[in-house]
Amino acid sequence: MNLENTIAQMRKGILEFCILALIAEEEVYPSDIIEKLKQSRLIVVEGTLYPLLARLKNEGLLAYRWIESTSGPPRKYYRLTKSGEISLQQLRKAWRELDLAVNSIVKESE
């Protein structure tokens, strides 16, 4: 088993969920998402985040607006759409179920 690959795949699998949850808290700029993920020890680079944000926007889960910046060009701030809010609710439910299932198995084997 390639442990590093398995861990990377686990993190990748929950990244979309975590990003939607962060954006649900407030309208957010991508570098703020990266910083919050780093604080949670989920390291993500711009090359991973921007395509994911574009895909979520194209799927109708996110919207954005441009906000003028005092220190450079305008910035794109993301927010959840109604569809994004519904998807996040569904992901939260699925996460709770998965968390319970995995913990019941893991605790049994310890």
Image (tube, helix red, strand yellow):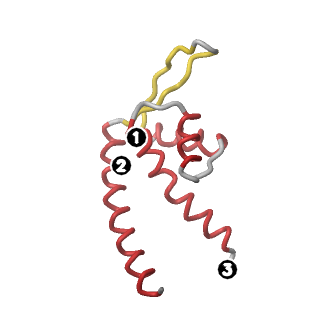
Q: Is residue 100 above or below residue 53?
A: below
Q: Amino acid at mark 3?
A: Met
Which residue is painted at 62% across and 48% down in the image? 44
Residue 42 placement (x, y as % from top left): 57, 53
Q: Amino acid at mark 2?
A: Leu
Q: Quadrant of residue 4?
A: bottom right
Which residue is painted at 53% across and 25% down in the image? 76
Q: Is residue 27 above or below residue 19?
A: above
Marks 3 and 1, the one that precedes in the sequence: 3
The residues tagged by marks 3 and 1 sit, at their Cα atoms, a distance apart of 35 Å
Residue identified by numbered label 3 = 1
Residue identified by numbered label 1 = 61
Q: Quadrant of residue 92?
A: bottom left
Residue 72 placement (x, y as % from top left): 64, 15
Q: Amino acid at mark 1?
A: Leu
Q: Residues within 10 Å of mark 2 (few under 14, many from 20)?
A: many
Q: Which disc, if any, is residue 88?
A: 2
52 and 42: which one is in front? 42
The residues tagged by marks 3 and 2 sit, at their Cα atoms, a distance apart of 32 Å
